[in-house]
Amino acid sequence: MSAINEVSTRPVILTDGAVRELKRIMEEQKVPSDYGLRIGVKGGGCSGFSYILGFDVQKDNDEEFEINGMRVLMAKSHGIYLVGMEIDYVEGLNNRGFTFTNPNASETCGCGTSFSA
């Protein structure tokens, strides 16, 4: 397991609302304590890439960060697509769920989980 990187190298921002909801989900789903929050991208979606957000164990090609009290795992190759992104959780009348604000996305899809770079 690698050492946790310094706060100054955090690739993404997790808002307080996102952290509250993630911790609630972890407790509700009884996520094992050795799991971290995996943030990443995968091919597909309406615009070419879609976001990965889930709980997982650390893999060999991962970097580990502590962001707003959460252990975050990210494949080293995904940083180019995600650096500077903000993940929030909203609860509104018309919308409820995680939102991704990504300054690296040249286009986003109406679903909010797909982008092109």
Image (spheres, rainbow, N blue to C red):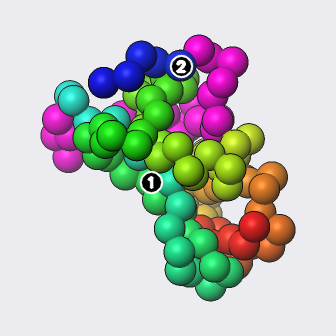
Per the rendering, the mark at residue 5 is: 2
What residue lies at 53% left-to-right and 61% top-to-bottom?
41
The amino acid type found where label 2 is placed reads: Asn
Place of residue 73 in the rendered image (x, y in percent of width and height, measured from the top left) = 43, 38
Per the rendering, the mark at residue 53 is: 1
The magenta stretch spans residue 10: yes
What residue lies at 49% left-to-right and 26% top-to-bottom?
65
Place of residue 4 in the rendered image (x, y in percent of width and height, measured from the top left) = 46, 18
Question: Which quadrant would residue 96 be assigned to in this image?
Answer: bottom right
Q: What element carries label 1?
A: strand
Stretch of the chain drawn in magenta? 6-32
Place of residue 35 in the rendered image (x, y in percent of width and height, measured from the top left) = 26, 36
What residue lies at 21% left-to-right and 30% top-to-bottom?
34
Judge left or right: residue 10 versus residue 28: right
Residues packed near mark 1 inside 10 Å, few (<14), some (14 to 19) or many (20 plus):
some
Judge left or right: residue 12 versus residue 5: right
